[in-house]
Image (cartoon, rainbow, N blue to C red):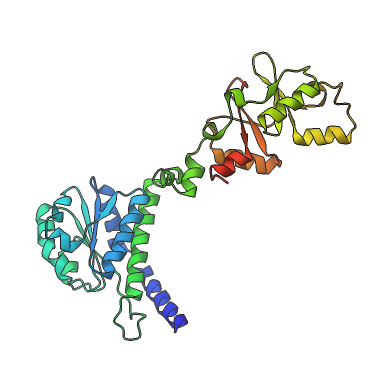
Amino acid sequence: MGRRVLEIERDGLQGLLSRIDTDFVRACERMMACTGRVVVTGMGKSGHIGGKIAATLASTGTPAFFVHPGEASHGDLGMITRQDVVLAISYSGETAEIVTILPLIKRMGAPLIAMTGKPNSTMAKMSDVHLNVAVDQEACPMNLAPTASTTATLAMGDALAVALLDARGFTPEDFAMSHPGGSLGRRLLLKIADVMHGGDRLPKVAPGTPMTVALLEMTRQGLGMTAVVDAQDRIIGVYTDGDLRRSLEEQVDLRTATIDQVMTPGGRRARPEWLAAEAVRLMELHKITALLVADADDRLVGVVHMHDLLRAGVV
């Protein structure tokens, strides 16, 4: 039975392909031209689907919210203005709570997009644009419970949202702005400056510093490395735990050596205004766990460590 349900719902979605037509384009044009909000309304299961469609629209660059049609008759109709576009959802196209408020919406002058399974229904006839989400049958064996029809309605809503997203040139950064608490938001909004160590937490020594002193600096800051900088804090090189292992393998006398004799000249670096996700990419590419952070004049301003990125949820 489970397989049969999926087959019915798949067939219902297949039938929608031919309905991405001029009516669909007109609906998108109305929503693109909207200077207010897209107000989604629906009753029962259609209402649940409508709430999700409104949320998807809002998170992808089309301001939208859901209004319960029953509450609309008792004051919430005041939430709708003539600058809005109303997207009304009802498979039968005859839902009483919606039909009751349609004349008021029309009188207000707000464009009406109806999404129904009945092209000859009251809602379809009263709408400015009708989107047909009819399916041959419900997945319910009694052909009663909204199943394939609600799946088709949700898919049509997704098609609208994504078409509008594409038309608006909506970017991942735009998406992150409406999802600051999610992992994508953290990856796309967090800058290196937000997670790097700076000020007194910067491990740095001057060229000519004895290795015994440089190792103490690495230990003091606990970042597994130290930068080597000149008198103006411009980066000359870097010395890491990996360099220390190589020094030991090469039997360097750390009691007499100076940092500039064993450091890695230059070193990988980033800019504080870069995305933290870019720091992750560089670390993975070069198989390192820390990056020097420099300003436009190549002066050391920070160090970002993989542990910091892990704690921030960027990785």
On screen, residue 148 above or below 156: below
Would you say residue 12 is visible in this rendering? yes
Q: Position of residue 296 (x, y in %)?
A: 58, 22
Q: Give the percent coordinates (x, y) of residue 53.
A: 32, 59
What is the count of numbered marks? 0
- Is 283 placed above or below 216 here? below
Q: Residue 10 is drawn in which quadrant?
A: bottom left
Q: Give coordinates of residue 60: x percent, y percent.
A: 37, 50
Residue under the point 26% across and 48% down: 33
Query: Considering depth in this image, is 15 or 73 the residue closer to the camera?
Result: 73
Q: Residue at x 47, y 81 (%)?
A: 3
User: Which quarter of the figure has residue 280?
Assistant: top right
Quarter of the image with the N terminus is bottom left
Left or right of residue 215, residue 156 in this image: left
Q: Position of residue 114 (x, y in %)?
A: 22, 64
Q: Which of the two residues, 295 or 252, is positioned nearer the viewer here?
A: 252
Residue extending furthest top?
A: 231
At horizontal 29% and vertical 48% (from top left) the residue drawn is 63
Q: Is residue 195 left or right of residue 36?
A: right
110 vs 234: above or below: below
Rendering quarter of residue 14:
bottom left
Q: In the rendered view, does 79 fall on the left or right side of 275?
A: left
Describe residue 157's horizontal placement relative to residue 242 as left or right.
left
Q: Nearer the viewer, residue 260 or 42?
A: 260
Q: Residue furthest right?
A: 251
Residue 265 visible, this orientation: no
